[in-house]
Image: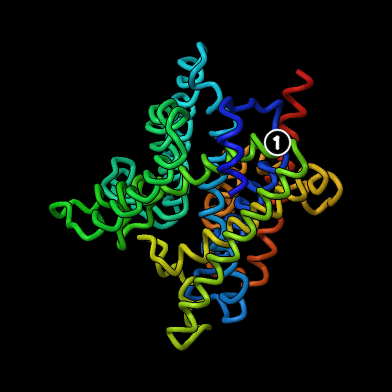
Amino acid sequence: MPMAIAWKETPQLPKAEGRIDAIDLARGIAIGLMIVSHSVSGLVGIRNVPDWGMVPIHFLTKFSSSLFIVVFGIALAVAFLSHTQSGDWPKRRLKLWLRAVEVWFWYKALLIVEMLPFNTPSEIVDALLYGRFGIWVEILGFYAIALLWVPLMLPLWARAPLWSRLATIGVLTALTIWLQSLTFGGNDILKALLVDHEDHYTWGQVSRAPLILVGLLIGEALLRCYFEPAMRRRLVLTLLGLGALMVGGFYALALASGDVYAAMRAVANNVGKHPPGLEFMLFSLGGALVLLALALAGGAKAAKAAKVLLPLTIVGSDALKAFIFHIVMIFLVLRFLWEGEGVYSYPQALGVGGLLILGAAAWIWVIRWMNAHR
């Protein structure tokens, strides 16, 4: 494979000069899909979505979670992996841990915002103390914990040969399957934090770790290939081929089940998302790789030339601010202050999602403009 050849011929990992717009674009696409999904589920409710909305619209938003986590790994590789053997690594590691504290703070703050409209104070306190989980902000809880352990393994990952990295991904996947079969002594919260739980809408550290590691692999390949047009095309084609193969695998299983539409609707209804199932992950990760390949193929030119993509690139350049903005607007403003749950039709909720993407991009741009003119 081209990526394997690049690793063999170039032992020293290059450092990125500035931001790579294609990464911001890919992250922005993931966040945009997430905002649309949250607008619909938060204002309309999944049970009230019409059939034409479930498939294809809500079906396609399932690319979001896998793309978001994979891009998280890519960003870590691009920004930090080449520095793990340098003298300033302790300072950079501390930066990641401080980021974990920041993300954890906003996770808890936004958890209050999410639960405020329809939960009692005692239920909110219970969630703050990890006695239960929310729904829409739990991805931040996942990142807060991941940012604690990922910096510890990055130096080992940077020194490990490719075969051992691939083996680690395989072992973690097998470990996830085994751990999901255990009861954890009835401790559902611990199981949810580690490998997901069907009764809790959270993200397991072990079950999602393979996606982060896949992102690290792609991120390293991106550093080696992105600035060489021929190698970049090979990387794009490799990701596109792998993604198409996985999506094809999903449809092959759907055909074998005898009802393709039912399989698509099941994915749209989050069947196989928590805990991750084979069909859901084939479609979600496969689609994520296709979108990532398209973002890398277009890169900075696409982000600057197409006005419709520029807000996504801005949103992707500051994911935390975008996440905070859309959660506050949906749950504090629209659901709580304006009592808007169930008031909006499905098309209106889609429109709200689009406006929130533009609003998040504008908010990020205004804050940067203000900081630059202080």
Quarter of the image for residue 101 reads top left
Query: Where's residue 252, x and y in %?
Result: 50, 77
Query: Where's residue 69, x and y in %?
Result: 51, 47
Query: Where's residue 274, x and y in %?
Result: 37, 60
In the foreground, 186 or 364? 186
In the foreground, 73 or 28? 73
In the foreground, 48 or 80? 80
Quick one: which residue is furthest to the left in this view? 185
Residue 213 visible at all: yes
Judged left or right of residue 34, residue 277 is: left
Determine the residue positioned at 49% across, 83% down.
255
Judged left or right of residue 124, residue 112 is: right
Judged left or right of residue 187, residue 135 is: right
Q: Amino acid at mark 1?
A: Ile
Determine the residue positioned at 52% across, 53% down.
331
Query: Disc 1 designates what residue?
Result: 20
Q: Is residue 47 above or below residue 134?
A: below
Residue 340 visible at all: no
Element at label 1 = loop
Quick one: which residue is furthest to the bottom in this view? 258
Within-10-Å neighbours for mark 1: few <14, some 14–19, many 20+: some
Looking at the rendered image, the quarter that the C terminus falls into is top right
